[in-house]
Image (tube, helix red, strand yellow):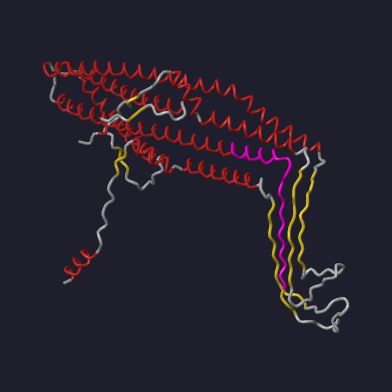
Amino acid sequence: MIFVLLLCTIAACPVRAQEPTAHYTLQQFVDSALEHNADIAAAQWKVAAASAQLRKAQSGRFLSRLRLKSESGLVPEAKGDIFNPPSDTAGVRPLGPFNRTELEFIQPLYPISYGQQLKKAAENGVGVERADLAEAKIATIYEVKKYYYGFLLAQDLLALVQRLTSELTERQDELADADSLPMSSRYKLDLALISLEEQEREVASQLQLAQRALAWRSGLSETTLVEIRAQWLAPVQAAVPPLEVLLQSAAAMRPDWQKLQAGIVARKALRDAARSAYKPQVFIGGGVRYAIAPGRTDQHNPFVKDEFNVFNGAIFLGVRQSLEFHLMAADVDKAQAEYRELSAMKDGALQGMRLDVRRAYSNYQRRDDDLKSARQSRKLARQWLKEAQEEYEFDPGEIKELIAAFESWAQIEQNYFQAIFDFNLSVADLERKTGGMELSKEDADALQTD
C-alpha cells in the first residue's frame, strides 16, 4: 500500500523540463551584447540625460519663467469698511475660508543669441554622448569577437591535445611489447604523455573561462546554457577595401572623431554664451494676482489694502544688467581656454586616427601573410606525419622519426590555430579602428551542424 501511494505521489509531481541549450552564432552573440551589455546601457542613459538637457535649453527660450502659486486656508471674518467698521473690534470673530492665487511670467527678448547658443551647446552635448554610445557599441562588438575566437581557439587546442594523447597512448602500448627498441624512445614517449596531460588540464580550464567571459560580455546570465554553433575556428570571410577607403571611412564614422568635433562646437557655443553676459538682458514680465475671502468685505478704497480680497495684474518691460565685469571676464577666459584646448587637439587627433587605421591595416596584411605561411607549413607537416606513419608501419625501429613528426605536426597545428585567431582578431581590430565598418562574415562551413 505504501509503495502504491509513493508511486501516485511521484506521478502527481510536475516534471520540470530541462531547458534546451541555445546554440549561438557570432552574430547572435553580438546582437545579445548590443541589447543587454551594461556599458551600452549606461551610455544610453547618458544620451537620455543629455537629451533632457537639450529640451531644457529649448524650453528656456520661450517663457523662461512661468509660475503659479495658490494658497488656501482660514482667516477671521471682517464685515464692513472704513466708514462702517465692525461694532465688535475686540472679540473673537468667526473664521472663514480664503484662496489666494498668483500667476507670473517672464519672456526674454534680448540678447536672442544667448538662448540660441545654449541650445547649440546642448545639441552638441547630445552628439558627444551619442558618440560615446557608438564607441561603447564598437568596443563591445570587438570584445565579443575576441572572446568568441578565443573560445573556439581553446576548443580546437583541446581537441588537438586529446587527439595527440590518444595517438601516443596507442604507440605506448606498441612500444611496451617491442624489446628491441632503445630505452630512450619509451622514456620520451612517457614524458610526452605527461606533458600532454598538463596541457589538457590547462586548455580545459581556459576553455571554461573563455565560455564564461563570452557569456558575460554578451550580456547573458551565468545560468544560461550557451553553446557555440561553429564546429571549429575558421578564418573569417574578409572583404577589406584599399587603405584610402578605410581612411575615408574612419574620418566619417569614428566615434572619437565625431565626439571631438561635437565637443569643439559645444565649447565654442558656451564661449559665445559667456560673452553674451556682458549685454543687458531685456525681458517682458507680468502676472495676475487674485484672492477671495467670502467672509470679508471687499474694500474698494484705493488706500485700503486687504491681502485676502484682491484682483490685479500688470505687464512690464524689464532690464537686468550684471556689473560684475571682472567675474564675467574670468568666465569668458575659461570658456575660451576650454574651446582652444579642444581645437588644439583636432589636427593631432586626425593624424593619430589615420595612424591607427594604417597600423591596423598593416597588422591585417601581416596576419594574412602569416596565415598563408601557416597553411603551407601545415600541409608539409601533415605530409611528413603521413610518411613517418607509413615508415613506422614498415619498420617499427623508426619510432624516433614518428615521434619527431608528431611533435612537429602538433606544434604546427597549434601555430595554425593561433594564426587563424590572430587573423580574425586583426580583421575585428580593423573594423574597430575604422569606426565599425563591416569587413567580415563568419565562415559558413564552420556553422554546418550536419
Occupied quadrant, residue 344:
top right
Left or right of 284, for residue 357: left
Image quarter in which the N terminus is found: bottom left
The residue shown at (44%, 20%) is 245
The residue shown at (85%, 70%) is 301
Left or right of 310, for residue 171: left
Q: Which residues are magenta?
A: 98-124
- Residue toward you, 178 or 322: 322
Left or right of 371, for residue 105: right
In the picture shown, does residue 420 fall above or below 303?
A: above
Occupied quadrant, residue 125:
top right
Does the stretch in magenta take in 19?
Answer: no
- Residue toward you, 232 or 443: 443
In the picture shown, does residue 385 fall above or below 57?
A: above
The x, y position of residue 432, in whole percent, is 45, 28
The x, y position of residue 430, in whole percent, is 43, 25
The residue shown at (48%, 41%) is 39
The x, y position of residue 448, in whole percent, is 23, 34
Left or right of 112, for residue 358: left
- Residue toward you, 184 or 158: 158
The x, y position of residue 330, in whole percent, is 76, 35
Image quarter in which the C terminus is found: top left
Which residue reaches farthest front?
300
Does the stretch in magenta take in 120?
Answer: yes
The residue shown at (34%, 22%) is 419
